[in-house]
Amino acid sequence: MESLAQLELLCEKLYNSRDSAERAHAESILKCFSENSDYISQCQYILDNASTPYALMLASSSLLNQVNDRSLSLQLRLDIRNYVINYLATRGPKLQTFVIKSLIQLVCRITKFGWFDDDKFRDIVKEAADFLSLASQDHYFIGLKILYHLVGEMNQANAMPLTLHRKIACSFKDQFLLQIFQISLTSLHQLKTEVPDDFRRDPLSLALRCLSYDFVGCPVDESSEEFGTVQLPASWRPLLQDPSTVQIFFDYYKVNDTCVSKEALECLVRLASVRRSIFVEDPSRTQFLSHLMSGTKEILQTGQGLADHGNYHEFCRLLGRFKVNFQLSELLSIEFYGEWIGLVAEFTTKSLLSWQWASNSVYYLLSLWSRLVTSVPYLKGDTPSMLDETVPKITEGFITSRINSVQASFANDSSDDTLDNVDVLQEQLESLPYLCRFQYQNSSIYIINIMEPLLQAYMERSRLPAPGDANELSVIEGQLTWLVHIIAAILKIRQTIGCSQESQELIDAELAARVLQLINVTDTGVHAQQLYARLSELLGLNDHLVLLNVIVGKIATNLKCYAECEDVIDHTLSLFLELASGYMTGKLLLKLESTKFIIANHSRETFPFLEEYRCARSRTTFYYILGCLIFMEDTPVKFRSFMEPLLQVAVNLEATADAAFRTDVVKYAFIGLMRDLRGIAMATNSRRTYGLLFDWLYPSRMPLLLKAISLYADEPEVTTPLLKFMCEFVLNKAQRLTFDSSSPNGILLFREVSKLIVAYGSRILLLPNGTDIYGSKYKGIWISLAVLSRALCGNYVNFGVFELYGDRALADALDISLKMSLSVPLSDILAFKKLSKAFYGYVEVLFSNHITFVLNLDTNTFVHIVSTLESGLKGLDTGISTQCASAIDSLAAFYFNNITAADGPPSPAALNLARHIGEFPTLFPQILKTLFEIIIFEDAGNQWSLSRPILSLIMISEQMFSNLRAQILASQPVDQQQRLSQCFDKLMTDVATNLEPKNRDKFTQNLTTFRHDFLNAQIESEEMVNLLLELQYRFLFS
C-alpha cells in the first residue's frame, strides 16, 4: 500500500504540477508502465486498488500506449478488453469523466486493431447495447459514449496502414453503423423529455458522428461542394423516408442549450446533403424536402436560437444546402414555397446588414441565391419563382453593406479589414456576379449611382493643395476599392440571363469606364514623362490599343511607385502575365511604347521593386513576362541587348574575390541574378529561344554558379534560387533541348549539372541538422534530386559515353544523389510533400534508366529503396503511387526478362538482383499483396498504372501468385470463397507468359473485370446483411 500511495503522489504531480521539472521527473519514473509489457498486470492492479483518478488515468493511458505498439498477443488483448468492459460495468458510474473517456478509448482501440483477428472483438456493439438496458442512468450514458468513441475510432486511420484501416472501416460500416444510428434515434426519442438538457447531447453527438462517417473512403470536406454529398448506403433509406427522423432533430433544436441546438442543426445539414439517388421515387424525395423546408420555415418565422452565433452559422449552412441537393423545380413544387422563399430573402437581407456579426455565414446564403438564379433558364412551367422581386433587394443589400462596412471599420478602429484578406474577399464576391447579372440593368444603375458621387468627391480631394481629413479620404478610397472589386467580379462572369448579349456589353462598358476614370485620377502626377507623354492624347481615341495602353500604363506605374507594397506588385505582375501569355495580346503589347520602354529599361533604377528583397520572388515572374515578350520577336540582337544589364551583374560577380563573395551586397546581387535567369529560362519554349540563353550562359557564366554553390552551400537563401534555376534550365519541355547531331552541348550541360550536384551534396551532407531541417537541408536535397531527375530523363544525353571514356560525371552524380536520399529518414520523406515527390521521381528514373546502378548496391540499401516504394504505393498521392508502380514494374520486368525467362547466362546485374531476392524472399510477395489490396479495397484513380507491376510480379513466379490468392480467399466469408475463386480464374484468362504490350493491355482489362466482379460479390453479401437489419428495424418500431 505504501508503494501505491507513492505512485498516486507521482501521478498527482504528473497531471497537476505547475513545475515542469517536477512533471518531467514524474514522467521519467512512470514511463515504464507505457513502454514495458511486463507492467500490464500492475496497471490492472492500479485500476483495482487506486483511489485517485490520476492513478487510474495513468493505468488507462499506459495500457493504451501498450496497445498502440501492436506487439501484444491476441489472448492478452482479449483479456484486457474483457477486463475493461467489466470494469466500466461495475465501477464506471463512480469514475471521473476523463477516466471513463480514457478507458473507452482503450476498448475502442483494442477493438479496431483486433477487428479481423477474432470475432469476439466485434461483440462491443452488443455489449454497449447491454449498458443501455441497465437500470442505472449512468450506465446508459456510458453505453452511448462507448458507441460514440467506437464510431470515431473506426473513422480515423490512427497508427495503422491506410489499406487496413479502410477494410476495417468498411466492414464496421456495413455491419454495425446503421444499427448504431438507430440506437441514437431511439435514445433521442426516449430522452426527449425525461432528462436535463445536458444529457441530451450524448445521443445527438452519436447521431452526428454516424452521419459524418467516411462512407466512401474520402473524408467529407465540408468547405468544398465537390465532396459535400453524404453517401449513405441504400439500407438507410427507410430511416430517411420516416418523417420522425428529420423532425426529431428540429425538436432538439428548440432545446435551450445552444450546444444541443447547434449539433441538431449540424445533423440536419448532413441529412440535407444526402445523395439524391438514395430516394428511388420522386414523391419520397419531395416529402423529405418538404419536411426540411417546413422546419426551416418555422425557425425563420420565430427566429428561435438564431441569436447564438454557432446556431446562426449552421442555419446558414443548412439553407445553402437546399439548392446543392435539390432542383429549383423541386423547391417550387412545395406548397408553401412562396412563403419560404420570402422568409429566406428577408433573413438574407438582415444578415447582409449585420455584416460584422455574420460575415463568415453570408457566403452560404449568397451561394444559395446564385444557384437559384442560374437555374432559372432551365425552369419549366408557369409557377412563379419570385426571384425577380427578391434578388435585386439582396444584390443592393450586399453592395450597400460593403460600402457601409468601410465607414464602420474606421469608426470602430477595426484592424480586421476584409479588403486586406484576399481569400475572404474572393469568397464574398464569388456569388455576387450571378446575382447582379440576373437583372443587370438595375444592378448596374445602382452601382453607378453609388460610384459617381464617390468619384466626384475623390477628384475634388485630389485637386486640393492640402490633404485635409485623412480619415475621410481613407473612407472614400476604401469604398471605391470595394466598388472596383465588385465591378471586376461582375466583368469576369459572362451570363445571358435577364438581358441580351449586346445590352450586357454596353453595361460592361459603362462599369469599366468608371474604373478607368478612377485610374486616371489615382495616377495623376506620378507618371514617368517619357512613358506617358502621349497617354492623355490617346484617351479620347476609339481604338483597342488605347485601352491596352491605359492598362499597361497602370502596370508600369504600380511597378515604379509601389515597390514597398508586395501585394500590389504581385497582383500587378499577375495582370501583366495574363496579358503577355496570350499570343495576340502579346503581339499587341509589343506595339505599345510603354511596353518597349519597360523592356529597354528593366533596371532597378527604373523599377525600384527589383531592389526590394521582400519582392525577390516577383523578379522571376517579371523576367518571365519580359522573356515571353522578347522571344516573340525572332531577333538575337534584341535578346543580347535585353541581357546586357544581367551581363554586367554577372561580370561584376565573377570579378569578386572569394573573400568578398560572402558579403550581403554580393549575396543579394547573386540571388537576384538567379531569380531573373530562372524567369527567362521559363520563357524559352523552343529550340531557338533556348539556344539563345544556352549560348549566353555556357561556358562563360557556369564557373560563377559553381563558385557560388561552393561558397554558399550552408545558406539555403542562396542555394535555393540557384538550384531552382538549374532545375528549370535542364528541363526538356517542348523538346527545347534539341541540339545538332554534331553538338556536344547535351553532354557538356550534364557535366556542369554533375559538378553542381556533387559540390552541393558533398557539402550539405557534412552540415549538422538544425532546428528547421527542412529549410536548411531537405529543401536543397529535393531540388537537387529534381535537377538530376530532369537531366537523366531529358533525352538529350547519351550516358553510355561517360563510362566509355572514363568520365566520372554520371557516376559521381548518382553516388552523391543516393547519399543525399539515404540521409533522409523515410518518415520525413513521407511527411514533406515536395520532398516525397522529388524522391520518388528520382527513384523512378533510376529504376527505369539506370537500374544497373541500383542493382550494384549492397543488399540492405537495395531492400531499403524497394521498401520505400511499397510505402509510396500506400500513400494518398496518386502521382507518387504511379511513380512507385512504374519503378516496381521496371524492377520486376528486369527480373523476368533476365532471370525467369532468360536464355543465356545472367549478367552481373541479374546475379546481383538474384542475390538480393535470395536474402529477402518476402520482398516481391509483400509488394504484390499490397498492390492487390489497393486494387480491391481502394478506389484507385491510377488502376492502369498499378496493373503493370502486378502482371510483371505474377510472371516472375506463379507460386507466389497462388499463395497470395489462397491468402486473400481465406480472409473472405466461407460462402463467398467459391465465387471469388472464379474471379481469380478469370483474371489470367488469355494472358500469355510474356510482358509484351498487347499482353499487358489484356491483363489490365481482366484486372478491371476482376475488381468489378470481386466487389459485386461482396456487395451482394452486404445487401443480405442490410436486408436483415432493415427487417430488424421495422420490427423494433412496429
Image: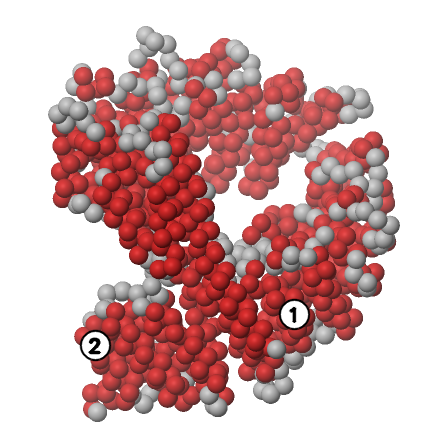
The total of numbered circles placed on residues is 2
Q: Judging from the image, what secondary structure is the residue with disc 2 in? A: helix
Which image quadrant is residue 704 in? Answer: top left
The answer to whether residue 488 is visible is yes
- Decide if residue 348 is on the left or right side of residue 749: right
Is residue 966 shown left or right of residue 579? left
Query: How far across and down, in percent of the image, does residue 771 sit?
Result: 31, 53
Q: Amino acid at mark 2?
A: Tyr
Q: Is residue 1003 left or right of residue 599?
A: left
Q: Is residue 929 above or below residue 153?
A: above
Q: Give the colour scheme of this rendering.
A: secondary structure
Quadrant that contains the N terminus: bottom left
Q: Position of residue 645 (x, y in %)?
A: 47, 21
Give the residue at x 32% y 82%. Answer: 56
Q: Earlier in the sequence, mark 2 or mark 1?
A: 2
Mark-to-mark CA distance, 2 and 1: 52 Å
Q: Which mark is residue 242?
A: 1
Q: Nearer the viewer, mark 2 or mark 1?
A: 1
Q: Which residue is mark 2?
A: 39
Q: Amino acid at mark 1?
A: Asp
Q: Nearer the viewer, residue 712 or 969?
A: 969
User: At x 30% / y 84%, what residue is drawn?
Assistant: 47
| Residue 725 against residue 695 in the figure, above or below | below
Mark 1 residue crowding within 10 angstroms, few (<14) / some (14–19) / many (20+) = few
Is residue 458 or residue 197 the one in the foreground?
A: 197
